[in-house]
Image: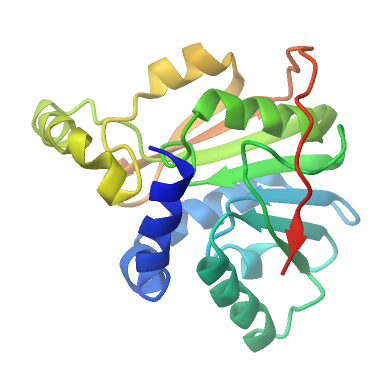
């Protein structure tokens, strides 16, 4: 997985993403926004916001910033905001999730939906989420992880060599992810049909490592 492969994959997905991944994963989006318990005035960062399927779920009294590396996906998100009359709810930016152009401690809550198995370096993603989240803030993730069902797990392992073309890792392990990132998980629970995905709520336990300077971003 690399940035070029991801951009190419989601350029292909942009027009059909809502049809293929909208309704089937929407229960997970709804569950995680509800779990976030957003309060009035909070500043929320959604990492890799895609076509903005989650944006109408946020309360209108919070400030959401959504970032994504894919311009075509963000264009669909912008159309959604205008169509639903919630243009003022979210600011959308073209940005690499592993190199965010935000100052430290910029957001009250940071969320990544169906992202961890997509980015080139999940550990770097989580470190950046920690960096931009305020001390004592919360980090939320929802993602499909490698199935513990032996049949489904075998199929996912067989698909793993195609990750670059699929645009995600079908054999992405939750245990390995938590071990590598050191996330302090407060709650882990299944979501979506047949418990296909997993929601992770974590405390922002910053590692204390010096942040790597981030490049400038390009607002859409």
The quadrant in which residue 25 appears is bottom left
* Residue 217 pos. (x, y %): 76, 53
Residue 180 lies, with reference to residue 31, above or below; the image says above
At horizontal 66% and vertical 55% (from top left) the residue drawn is 67
Left or right placement of residue 207 versus residue 198 in this view: right
Q: In this rendering, does residue 91 appear at all?
A: yes
Q: Nearer the viewer, residue 212 or 30?
A: 212
At horizontal 69% and vertical 31% (from top left) the residue drawn is 128
Q: Nearer the viewer, residue 196 or 111?
A: 111
- Report the quarter where the C terminus lies: bottom right
* Residue 7 pos. (x, y %): 45, 55
Left or right placement of residue 7 versus residue 83 in this view: left
Residue 187 lies, with reference to residue 108, above or below; the image says above
Q: Nearer the viewer, residue 213 or 156?
A: 213
Q: Nearer the viewer, residue 104 or 19?
A: 104
Q: In this rendering, does residue 51 appear at all?
A: no
At horizontal 79% and vertical 12% (from top left) the residue drawn is 208
Left or right placement of residue 78 versus residue 22 in this view: right
Q: What is the tally of numbered marks visible in this picture?
A: 0
Left or right placement of residue 12 versus residue 3 in this view: left
At horizontal 63% and vertical 52% (from top left) the residue drawn is 33
* Residue 55 pos. (x, y %): 64, 66
């Amino acid at each position: 997985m690399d940035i070029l492969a991801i951009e190419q994959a989601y350029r292909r997905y942009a027009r059909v993403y809502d049809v293929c991944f909208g309704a089937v994963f929407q229960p997970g989006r709804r569950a995680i926004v509800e779990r976030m318990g957003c309060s009035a005035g909070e500043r929320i960062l959604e990492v890799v916001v895609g076509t903005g399927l989650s944006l109408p779920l946020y309360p209108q009294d919070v400030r959401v910033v959504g970032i994504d590396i894919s311009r075509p996906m963000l264009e669909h998100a912008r159309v959604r905001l205008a169509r639903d009359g919630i243009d003022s709810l979210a600011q959308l930016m073209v940005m690499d999730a592993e190199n965010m152009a935000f100052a430290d401690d910029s957001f009250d809550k940071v969320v990544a939906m169906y992202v961890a198995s997509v980015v080139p370096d999940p550990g770097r993603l989580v470190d950046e989420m920690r960096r931009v989240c305020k001390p004592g803030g919360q980090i939320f993730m929802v993602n499909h992880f490698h199935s513990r069902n032996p049949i489904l797990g075998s199929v996912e392992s067989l698909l793993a060599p195609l990750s670059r073309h699929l645009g995600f890792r079908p054999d992405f392990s939750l245990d390995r992810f938590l071990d590598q990132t050191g996330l302090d998980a407060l709650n882990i629970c299944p979501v979506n049909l047949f418990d296909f995905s997993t929601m992770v709520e974590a405390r922002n336990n910053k590692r204390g490592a010096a942040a790597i300077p981030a490049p400038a971003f390009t607002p859409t």
